Amino acid sequence: MSAHHDTAPALRAVLIDGSGSDLETAVAQCRLAGIIVNGWADNGAAALELIESLPAPPDLVIMELDLPDMDGPDLLQALSMLEPGLPVIITSRHSARLHDAALTLASALGLDALAALPKPLNAQALQDAALNCEPASARNTAPARTHCDAGLPRPDAGEVLSGLHHHQFELHYQPKASLQDGSLRGAEGLIRWRHPQHGLLSPACFLPQTEAANLVDVMTVEVVRMALQDWKRWHTEGLSLPISINLSPLSLADPHLAEELITAVNQAGVPPRAIIFEIIEHEEIADLATALRILIKLRMHGFGLALDDYGAGHASMLQLSRFPFTEVKLDRRLIHGAAKRPHMLPLLRHTIASARELGVTTVAEGIELEEDRQLLRELNCDLAQGYLIARPMHARALPLWREKSAAAGKVTGTVIQLRP
């Protein structure tokens, strides 16, 4: 075991544990791991007071879930209010499933949930958990933008419609690669708005207004138009691969949608097998009969159909069984950190095996860690998508990424990143 400070500045940690003997063990193991103990507390209130009194935030907090004055969930909430984005390592003698739930809570509160470790702590586990933890001085505490921040513009429906008419939207593509040999097997088209005043806007800044104004189908047609143009351009350059396009559940209530999509693809001269429609279900589909009619038509004409965000919300085995899906995308919340969550193995193994028996391709979303990619490869998952493979990029960059990735060696799994 090499100490953390051999390769980077030593991290400063605050320890919180109600057991005196466990606290002594944690202090000793932190020092063996090269982690500086900035202070410790045996209850939640004292810990919060300690952190607030420090001249600078700690690099991380190592906390027990069972404390004499407050439960771990309450302490996590208090920490998130005191220091948003603070990295935490959770420890206790509870089950792995409860640990995983606590990590999910920490992430939902905006904390950087590094790991959950069983007691007694050991130096190697601490060092592994803190490997990707940045010092507070280098850390950007702004939360990841999964929503449209208050300071960002929120164009109204009229602006959205004008932007669609003036073709201000564009697609960025995130590659999907084989988990067995690393070869490029597809790409998901992710919509962005190149706003003339506000620059590049993410979907969170305009999709709610689009849905509220019943403009989803108009936007879907524009996305399909752009995807078909990009596919044809790639095809002339010798790159032929399927493009995945998100299809809103709201669109599945339009009985004319299938005909519009089929006509657009046929007129463009693109084979339907080159397009995969991804269905995201955040709520139960209201008109099941219409949705089934649309999806069956699309499938009969050769389009691929993917069940997105499987394992979250309404994307379940029931939906996989009653719709003619050709692909299932495992939600990143199932995938991220799965290699360190043993109780996830039977769930992933069962899902992947069931999909394989049904002849459905499996895609692991949100692959960011090499150990997760290795685990999914061992479980015979088919494809991977995520930052470890590549970030979303402009259509013009994808052929170059393919060439550089192939030149680097597909079998070794070398990752090549091209900034959009």
Image (spheres, rainbow, N blue to C red):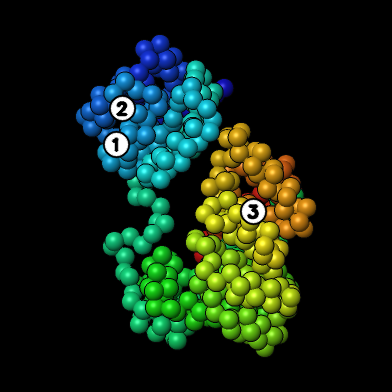
At 65% from the left and 44% from the top, the residue drawn is 348
Foreground pick, 16 / 70: 70
Q: Earlier in the sequence, mark 2 or mark 3?
A: 2
Q: Earlier in the sequence, mark 3 or mark 1?
A: 1
Q: Which numbered disc, 1 or 2, marks the residue closer to the eye?
A: 2
Quarter the N terminus occupies: top right
Q: Earlier in the sequence, mark 1 or mark 2?
A: 2
Foreground pick, 355 / 115: 355
Residue behind mark 3: 317
Residue neighbourhood size for the residue with mark 2, other residues' Cα within 10 Å, grouped as few (<14), some (14–19), many (≥20): few
Task: Pinpoint residue 374: horizontal percent, then vertical percent.
Answer: 67, 42
Foreground pick, 193 / 223: 223
Give the amino acid type for the residue marked by disc 3 in the picture. Answer: Met
Give the amino acid type for the residue marked by disc 1 in the picture. Answer: Ala
Local SS, label 1: helix
Q: In the rendered view, tell whether residue 118 sits above or below residue 242.
A: above
- Specify whether 97 is left or right of 71: right
Circles 1 and 2, Cβ within 8 Å, touching? The answer is: yes
Task: Pinpoint residue 409: horizontal percent, then vertical percent.
Answer: 72, 52
Q: Which numbered disc, 2 or 3, marks the residue closer to the eye?
A: 3
Q: Which quarter of the picture shows residue 212? A: bottom left
Local SS, label 3: helix
Local SS, label 2: loop
Q: Residue 78: which numbered mark, if any?
A: 1
Q: Residue 24: which numbered mark, if any?
A: none
Residue behind mark 2: 70
Circles 3 and 1, Cβ within 8 Å, touching? The answer is: no
Report, in whole angstroms, how far the alpha carbon at label 2 lies from the one at label 3.
38 Å
Q: Which quarter of the picture shows residue 322? A: bottom right
Give the amino acid type for the residue marked by disc 2 in the picture. Answer: Met
